[in-house]
Every structure is written in C-alpha cells, then in structure tokens.
Amino acid sequence: MKLSLSCPSCGKAIADLHHRSSQAQVNCISCGTRYGVVYGKLSRRSSIQEALLYLKATLPSFYKRHYTLQITTADRTLKHLQFSIPGKADVIPINRGDIVTVLYTMQGYVMKKLVAIANHTTGKNYVLPTPIPSSSHHVTILLTLITGFVAASFLGGFNLVLTSLLSAVSVLAYLKFTHSAHLTSPSLEGQPHEAQRLQADQRLMAQQRRIEQRISELHHERQANLVLIEQLKALQQKMSNVDQTLYSARIYRATGAIKILNQQITNNQRLVREYERTLRMIEIEIDTSWIADQLPDAENFTRTILGRLAELKEIEDQNQSLKFQLAAYEEVKLYGI
C-alpha cells in the first residue's frame, strides 16, 4: 500500500510513502516542504460534535467536531492525535483496528499543521480542506493578539479594564471558532494491559537490535579466527621447515591455540544459528501482537524468548573464557589478537 497526496504548499504530488516505511518524515520533491509521518494501528477513536451556534432548527447552525485518535505505531509506541474540524458530520473514514497514516507539516521537529489521514485497511484517504494548525501555532497567535491589545491601550490611552475585557472576549472567541491539532506521545506508565504488552514488545525489539548487532560481531569474529588459524598454520610450517625439534614447544602451543580458535568458531556458528532462530521468534511475536491487541499466551512466549537468550549467555561466557586462554599464547599475540 502507498499514500499519494498533493503538497499543500505547491500542489505537486508528494513521493509515495510505503505503508511500512520506518521513516518519520518525507520531503516534497518540488518545493522541499518537510512532512512528518505517523504510521500505525488505530487502537482508540472518539468523535464528539460541538454546537458553536444553534438557535433553532429553522435557522442556520454552526458546528465543529472533535476527534481523538490513539495510534499504536509499528515500533510499539503510542501516539495521541487530537484535532477539530468544521461541520457536524463524522467524515474521517477510520475505525478501531484500521492501519492508518497521519501526514503533517513540520516546524523543527514538531507538528506545524495537520494535512491528511489515510486508511490503509480500506484504501480511503481524508485530505483536510485546509491544514489544521497545531496548538503551539495558536498559542503564538494568541500571545500576539493579547500583546497588540495591551500595546494599543497604552498608546491610545484606552481604559485598561475595557481593553482587558475585550482581550478576554477575543481570546475566548478565537478558541471557540478556530480549529487546532495536537500530537503527543503519552507514557505507557499507568496504562492497562495494552501498555504491558507494548512494553513487552519494546523489550523484545530492543533485544532484536542487540541480537542483530551480535550476529554481525560473531560473523566478524569467525572470519578473523579463520585468518588467524591460517597464519598460525603458516608459522608452524615455517618452524617445522627450519628445525622441528628446536621449535617443538612453540609448534605445540600453536596447535593448542588453533584448537581453541576452532572451538570458538564452533561456538560462534551455534550462537549465530540460535540467535537467528530467536530473531525469527521475536518477529513472529511482534507481528502477532500487531495483528491481535492482546493474546492470552503472549507473555509466555516472551518469557520463552528471554529464557533462550539466558541459555545462550552460557555459550557467550565460554567464548570469553576461550579468549582469555588465547591471550596466554605468544604466537597469537604476534598477530595482534
């Protein structure tokens, strides 16, 4: 699935956003406007209408609708999006459980204006007729408005009480009739079972990153050990060609070092196999959690995975012991290992 939208700044098409993209932002190719992206699963939704002006059924009425969306992102965090739009109808085509993308312009690293919401589950997009400014943008306007009233009262000699009253009325009217958007990342602390599952997923994802790094290190160690073994064998051959009896002790030590290196290689191969298997288990748990909000046996699998990692720690400790043993061999020190 992809989200294709027009840039509000220049009207040109924004580059397609892949629905599982890990990027948090995208730039418009034409004008360079930077957009923030929130992708995830809608876990909560509320929609409430507010009557701004209602006298009776036969007269024109004005409404605004307030939305609160809670999105569980692909990296297992929560995002709260609150915004209001003009009108009475519920027009945002998303429901709980849908996979959605929120697109907004950025000011620094925070949201400036809400632009669009896409529903990847149904394929429906909602592009706001006019981008909705963020709460911080409205605060700036209000401060400017109040400062203007105060300055006018001093410069024009107006009554300060009357000016303050007008300022308060203006602020209330502004808050009443304008629309704003607010994006936050709430803490998981104090949340119900959903938060416990998200925290467990975050721990698994942290383990996933560490395991991926460790697998890379193990591949490097294996290659380095293979090179060292070849160097030690070449050294043995040189010593044997010169005088096998004279160098017998050193040849023996080199043989011992090669044996330890081979044991390390065997351990590394086993670790890589088990780590890769554990990675697949973690991926299954995270994907399963993404599909189902809460599974009865989720915590059991998480404990199983952490238990497997604890077992692999014994092999890691054995490898560390082998490294200490290798440090005693002068022939190994010769090659800077």
Image (cartoon, rainbow, N blue to C red):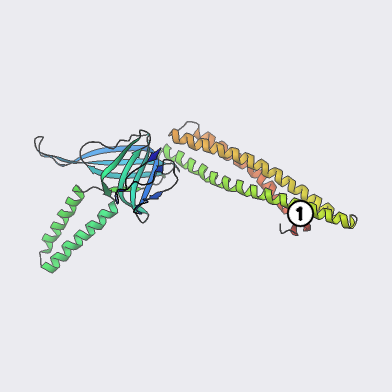
Q: Where is residue 111 in the image (x, y as percent from the top left)?
A: 33, 51
Is 323 or 217 nearer to us in this picture?
Answer: 217
Q: Which residue lies furthest to the right in this view?
A: 245
Q: How crowded is mark 1: few (under 14 residues within 10 Å), some or many (20 or more)?
A: some
What percent of the width, then of the height, locates residue 284?
Answer: 52, 35
In the figure, is residue 185 to the left or right of 304? left
- Residue at 22% from the left image edge and 36% from the top image edge: 89
- Helix, strand or loop under label 1: helix
Residue positioned 71% across, 47% down in the render: 264
Is residue 185 in sight in this rendering? no
Left or right of 197 on screen, residue 49: left
Q: Looking at the rendering, in which quadrant would you find the C terminus?
A: bottom right
In front of the other: 203 or 250: 250
In this image, 243 relative to 41: left or right? right
Percent coordinates x, y for residue 181 in the rendering: 29, 47
- 72 in relation to 297, above or below: below
Q: Can residue 277 be seen in this view?
A: yes
- In the rendered image, which quarter contains the N terminus? top left
Provide the residue designation for mark 1: 231
Q: Could you tell me which residue is drawn at 10 percent across and 36 percent down? A: 56
**In which quarter of the view is residue 328 placed?**
bottom right
Left or right: where does residue 266 sit relative to residue 57?
right
Q: Which of 90 and 324 is in front in this view?
A: 90
Amino acid type of the residue tagged 1 in the rendering = Gln
- Residue at left 43%, top 47%? 23
Q: Is residue 114 above or below residue 294?
A: below
Q: Position of residue 167 (x, y in %)?
A: 16, 57
Q: How many labels does the image show?
A: 1
Viewer-side residue, 192 vs 7: 7
